[in-house]
Amino acid sequence: LGQPVPIGDVMKQQEQASRKSSAQVVGKSGATKLHKQVEAKQVEASAASSAAAASSGPASPASTSANTGTTSQQKSKPSAPLYGLGWTVKGTYKKTAVSGSGKVGGVLALQDTTRPFPVQADVKIGDMHIALAGTVTAPAHLAVLDVKLWLQGVSMAHLFPLTGVPLPETPPYATEGRLVGQFKAEGNVFKYANFTGRVGESDVNGSVVYEGRKPRPFVSGELVSHLLQFSDLAPIIGADSNASKAKRGEQSKQPSDKALPTEAFKTDRWTAVDADVKFTGRRIIKNPDLPITDLYTHVVMTDGVLAFEPLKFGVAGGSLASNIHLDGSAAPLKGSMSTQARHLKLKQLFPNVKTMQSALGEVNGDAALSATGNSPAALAATSNGEVKALITEGTVSRLYMEAAGLNVANVVYEKLFGKRDVKINCAATDFVVTNGVLESRVFALDTDDAVINMDGHIDLRTEQMDLGIHPHTKGLRVISLRSPLYVQGTFKKPRVGVNAGALAVRGGAVVGLGLINPLAVLLPLIAPSNNKPLPCTQMLADIRTAPSAPPAGQQQRAKAAPAYMSSGATGSAAGSGSGDSARGQAARKAPPASPAPASAAQYRGG
């Protein structure tokens, strides 16, 4: 280097260079936010240190004497050596371009095991940028590594060839923190301590420990995001755009006609390490109409089996919690999932609708599914199990549907009710899932003046649906819009309309009777009462029964609709209109169910 360079000068230079590099990866705004995060953490650490010193109180003469002796000894210790040599590197490693430069101490300093040996590096490997500055104790034997570490790149998954740790796909990232390593015969231990960073538009903070255990290394840690951009989670399951995939080097593209992500999981990496990592997203930044508030997950990986125990979102004043197990050691991957939705408030499901704030009612539900496949789309296409949900004492309107962006639901709602608010006494859904096809075992909605039920199926394999919606009026009234409806098409291009056959029959009767007697033209439009209110208590008790799923790869057993769906309480609610199925017809022949002891209060309490 021509002349010795102090370690402090090199540290400052590397900080400046790394922050410029961060701006190139996460943008100037992201780099500025990262710099503020680091400064805030330094202030917090300084304040904690001062508080700890103040709490210890004044030192005793004995301790002062001891401290003075210690200080004298520290002063007598030689300071860390200066940087004396520089190096550069350029070439390829495993067909990946490598370039960089760095500095180390002088050659003679290698022989002195009493003084830390200074090291510094700034290297690019493919789309990754790695920089470090600090010291190594006893470099000839690699005793202890203590450096400040900066990482930047397009996706954290690209760190796998370097670290051997199967990190998830992410947006562009930049982190900085302290890396401390201990080199031991029984296994090296590295801790990326108290680091902070940016991943896309989100912040990330925490500590991660890598232990060189046998038969597999072990990674543990706790991570926290104070402001988590919900869209930054999309690359983890391959739900980001094709442009984003191309930027992070992913060759596969999401088909334009598919809504479920088709990008395959990299299960071949899951056996590289075992892991136990906790992640908390304290506040989620998302579309204002999306009622998600926070996130917590505990990720455990053991011998190729990836588990989320749980994956929990705060949603609409309640929670949506799932336990997910994905066995990547099997081919194809075997997965199972259980999900519980608890106390989702209707008024909070649509936070931007002022009139909704006076609405009552909440949503509770459960699901149990198993599947095989190496992508979210493949798992959905082979899923088996049950999905149940219940709404009690709610109010809903077309405006709420619009606020949620539920275009299909909005069209259906308007065709059934027009533009007025409708009070929901109760609503229940119970789907049986067989090889990726959701069949409606129970779908019933009880309002003040009508009972509405649905039959048909939703095919997750082809992402198509074919549903029939059948309204049944309460009391004697003249109706116009309450004709059977259909919802068909794909998830991306759904079609909603009125059942033409039912309208043709009604229209033919209007014309025929009109020729006989002009007053008789009203008769086809008068709907007699053939439905009593739904047995909400019995429905609620049935929904409370935990759903089940077979082992992954096995088919779900068929289940008949509950007897109360065919009892006098609901008339033809189990399967009426032109969309009657054999299951619905069988259900109508079943005997009435006995009353259930459950109540809405009990369910809410659970």
Image (cartoon, rainbow, N blue to C red):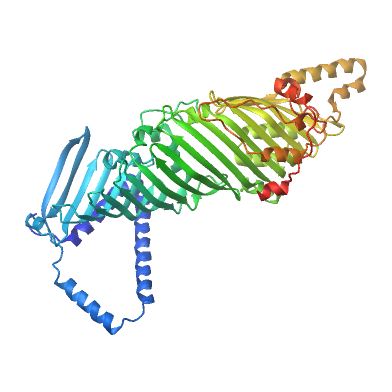
**For this view, does 299 lie left or right of residue 317?**
left
Query: How far across and down, in percent of the image, does residue 245 sit?
Result: 38, 34
Q: Nearer the viewer, residue 94 or 360?
A: 94
Query: How far across and down, in percent of the image, does residue 342 sit?
Result: 62, 46
Vertical comparison of 500 with 444: above or below: above
Vertical comparison of 520 with 195: above or below: above
**Residue at 40%, 47% in the rendered image:** 276
Q: Nearer the viewer, residue 590 or 477?
A: 590
**Residue at 35%, 36% in the rendered image:** 271
Vertical comparison of 42 with 486: above or below: below
Query: How far across and down, in percent of the image, does residue 150 sit?
Result: 28, 51
The N terminus sits in image quarter = bottom left
**For this view, does 25 lie left or right of residue 411?**
left
Q: Nearer the viewer, residue 591 or 227?
A: 591
**Residue at 38%, 65% in the rendered image:** 44
**Residue at 26%, 49% in the rendered image:** 188
**For this view, does 59 lie left or right of residue 356?**
left
Q: Nearer the viewer, residue 390 or 62?
A: 62
Vertical comparison of 58 with 550: above or below: below
**For this view, does 200 lie left or right of residue 386?**
left
Query: How far across and down, in percent of the image, does residue 398 sit?
Result: 69, 39
Q: Is residue 359 visible?
A: no
